[in-house]
Image (cartoon, helix red, strand yellow):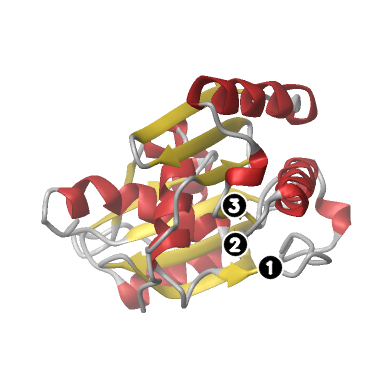
Amino acid sequence: MSRDRTDCYPALALDTSSTVLDVVLHTSDGIDRETIRAGRRHNELLAPILRRLFDRNDFSPRDLSIIACTIGPGSFTGLRIGLSTAKGLYATARQCRLVGVPTLDAYARAAYRPDVEAGETLPSPVLCAIDGRKQRYFAALYRNGERIWGPADVPPVEIAARVREQCSGTVIVVGPDNESVIAAVTAAVEEIEGDVSDASPTFERSSVYEGGVATAVLDLALSDIESTFDLRENAGPVYVRGSQADE
């Protein structure tokens, strides 16, 4: 279901769920964006980025119509900083919606986005995953832009089983840990099957995450009412697992 885009600009989108800090300000004149490898410096870097974006476009937080941010899974610290910043901006806005976007949905939208813009459909299914430590991953599976499984906090063998059930051919893997995901899930497929056959799914790394996913966050906030959430002011991140998994 699509949202009404009337009076939806200026809109701000944040992704602080990983080491790539990505911020997008969308006005009626287009998109202004800053993307930086932040490591764990989100708290230090986010406020200056926001000031620059607002100053360059002659806007203030009070002018915003929509604020969207990723809500998890992801870095506990990064998610808390992003959400608290979004809430702070929301508190100063005159008339605004605060929208939460599941992180893995944003990764999937980023993977499908170039094809959607070209009027085509990405033929391969997409596996979005984040290393949750302790030999487990936060994962979700998508086909034709729609989530068909997850998000779940599972070991690689469970991901392998789901992929074998739902997919054939090449599966595109998106996320900050896609290389380790591919290695772990491929090994799990071999464990399940005893050997890799021609019918086994194969995995292909996507670099789309590295360019930031805030534009995808904004896409979902503006267009997909079913997979995003209008957040309450007291809402917290969706961690999927308890805080002992913090980085």
Q: Are marks 3 and 2 in contact (CB under 8 Å)?
A: yes
Q: Earlier in the sequence, mark 1 or mark 2?
A: 2
Question: Which residue is drawn at the image coordinates 42% and 61% (left, top)?
Answer: 222
User: What's the CA distance linking mark 3 and mark 1?
Assistant: 10 Å
Q: Are marks 1 and 2 in contact (CB under 8 Å)?
A: yes
Which residue is at the front of the view, 111 or 4? 4
Residue type beneath disc 1: Leu
Residue type beneath disc 3: Ile
Q: Are marks 3 and 1 in contact (CB under 8 Å)?
A: no
Residue 193 visible somewhere in the drawing = no
- Residue 125 vs 29, above or below: the answer is below
Instruction: Give the image quarter of residue 48.
Output: top right
Q: Quadrant of the N terminus?
A: bottom left
User: Percent position (x, y) of residue 25?
Assistant: 49, 37
User: What secondary structure is marked by label 1?
Assistant: loop
- Kindly identify which residue carries mark 1: 231
Which residue is at the front of the view, 13 or 105? 13
Residue, far left: 119
- Kindly identify which residue carries mark 2: 99
Which residue is at the front of the view, 187 or 1? 1
User: What secondary structure is marked by label 3?
Assistant: strand
Q: Earlier in the sequence, mark 3 or mark 2?
A: 3
**In the rendering, which numbered label is found on residue 67?**
3
- Residue 68 vs 145, above or below: the answer is above
